[in-house]
């Protein structure tokens, strides 16, 4: 409870004496580029291969001749949109973005850069942490949308190249019984995951004490706690919104 209370006070401190909108917007764009653009490659690779592997494994297990092969495309679409794209992408980003946020803020703390900002009258939490959180909330949904597209396309390539099903059958499957709300659900999950990853990682880095070893420990703890929070939130959101 003590840690949770300290976390809530940390969140509250970001909203006190905030920077001017112009300065905050510039910082948010800079962080969005660092978080989003620099993560496109790893998210693309993971998403494409997850879609391909999912398609191949479903085709391997779907041996009943009474079940149409278009079901493979349907299952790849549902698994990608509801779970694989938002959750797996966020876990990958927790490792990359979370460790970066915690390591960066931890280094600034032990080198007394954060203390220098406070001495100059700048709210360091608002100036350093809030843009990172907003940048993550903006870019995570965009990366999840990219992951959805590439995962479904990866399944298409794997299914057609392996001969498991034809392209027409795959497209027929991904068009079958489509529910638009699933897209909204995935985007809601991505926003929640972005908030959890950015806030937990920022909290761990902001309150780092000691030296270089403690910065590494804070980064590791940030990634671990972020992944646990993502999995718990994934279950709660599925129970609540579906």
Image (spheres, rainbow, N blue to C red):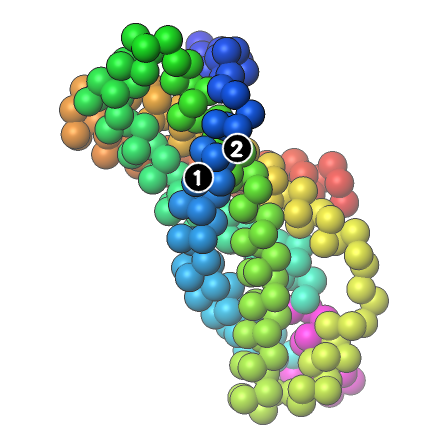
Quick check: 94 above or below 53? above
Numbered tag placed on residue 31 in the rendering: 1
Examine the rendering and report whether any part of residue 42 can be seen: yes
Q: Position of residue 58 (x, y in %)?
A: 60, 74
**Highlighted range, magenta:** 63-76
Residue extending farthest to the front is 22
Q: Nearer the viewer, mark 1 or mark 2?
A: 2
Question: Does residue 58 appear left or right of residue 95 in this picture?
Answer: right
Examine the rendering and report whether any part of residue 71 can be seen: no
- Residue at screen point 67% across, 89% down: 166
Magenta stretch: includes residue 206 = no
- Residue at screen point 66% across, 47% down: 187
Quarter of the figure with the C terminus:
top right
Q: Position of residue 24 (x, y in %)?
A: 50, 28
- The secondary element bearing badge 2 is classed as helix
- In the image, 76 versus 10, the foreground residue is 10
Q: Earlier in the sequence, mark 1 or mark 2?
A: 2
- Residue at screen point 55% across, 74% down: 154
Q: Position of residue 42 (x, y in %)?
A: 41, 59
- In the image, 34 versus 161, the foreground residue is 34
Residue beneath label 2, please?
25
């Amino acid at each position: 409870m003590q840690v949770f209370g300290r976390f809530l006070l940390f969140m509250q401190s970001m909203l006190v004496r905030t920077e001017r909108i112009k300065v905050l917007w510039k910082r948010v764009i800079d962080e969005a580029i660092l978080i989003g653009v620099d993560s496109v490659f790893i998210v693309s690779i993971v998403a494409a291969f997850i879609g391909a592997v999912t398609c191949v494994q479903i085709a391997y297990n779907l041996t009943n001749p009474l079940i149409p092969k278009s079901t493979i495309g349907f299952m790849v679409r549902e698994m990608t949109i509801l779970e694989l794209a938002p959750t797996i992408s966020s876990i990958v980003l927790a490792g990359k973005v979370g460790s970066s946020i915690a390591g960066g803020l931890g280094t600034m703390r032990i080198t007394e850069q954060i203390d220098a900002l406070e001495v100059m009258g700048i709210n360091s939490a608002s100036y350093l942490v809030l843009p990172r959180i907003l940048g993550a909330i903006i870019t995570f949904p965009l990366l999840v949308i990219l992951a959805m597209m590439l995962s479904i396309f990866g399944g298409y390539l794997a299914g057609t190249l392996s001969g498991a099903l034809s392209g027409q059958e795959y497209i027929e499957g991904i068009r079958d019984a489509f529910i638009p709300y699933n897209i909204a659900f995935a985007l809601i999950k991505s926003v929640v995951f972005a908030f959890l990853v950015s806030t937990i990682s920022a909290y761990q880095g902001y309150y780092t004490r000691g030296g270089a070893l403690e910065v590494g420990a804070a980064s590791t703890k940030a990634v671990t706690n972020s992944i646990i929070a993502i999995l718990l939130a994934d279950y709660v959101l599925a129970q609540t919104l579906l």
